[in-house]
Image: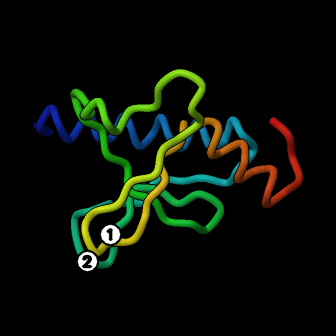
Amino acid sequence: MTHPSKRKGNRFERKMVLLARECGLNAKGVPLSGACEDYPSDIIVEGFEYQCKIRNRLPNYLQIHGNEIGLFCQQDRGEPLAIVDARKYLELLAYYLHGKEV
């Protein structure tokens, strides 16, 4: 039987694929995602590979508050990252790639 945390991760991956499709994007899950080097990503949206991570609770400093649409963060000597609402990001990606407003 599959471990509960693996099932939780699989559900989240499917949720993100469905959300991308709702926004008019081509999306699919990656078979054997994370199981071996040949399949490091969890999902593919419009040819772009993504990891999907779900946690019981994110640290407060990684959460979006009030009127913010996202946040930027960086680890020491790393590249800056952007965290944005998933639906908003996918809508922006759809608009950028296809000129579609969702």
From where the camera sits, is residue 92 visible?
yes
Q: Which mark is residue 37?
A: 2
Label 2 and label 1: CA atoms lie apart by 6 Å
Q: Which mark is residue 74?
A: none
Viewer can see residue 32: no
Say which of 76 and 21 sits in front: 76
> Do tag 2 and tag 1 residues touch (Cβ < 8 Å)?
yes
Quadrant of res 23: top right
> Which type of secondary structure does the marked residue at label 1 adopt?
loop
Q: What residue type is labelled 2?
A: Glu
**Whole-percent x, y for residue 22 in the image:** 69, 35
- Residue 48 position in % (x across, y down): 56, 66
Percent x, y of residue 2:
14, 39
Task: Identify the residue at horizontal 66%, vertical 42% (top origin).
Answer: 21
- Compared to 47, does 5 lie above or below? above
Q: What residue appears at the point 54 percent right and 53 percent down from the top-left corner?
A: 28
Q: In the visual, does 23 lie left or right of 18?
A: right
Q: Write down the residue under mark 1.
A: 40
> Which image quarter holds the C terminus?
top right
The colour style of the image is rainbow
Q: What residue type is labelled 1?
A: Pro
Characterize the local packing of mark 2: few (<14), some (14-19) or many (20 or more) Cα atoms within 10 angstroms. Answer: few
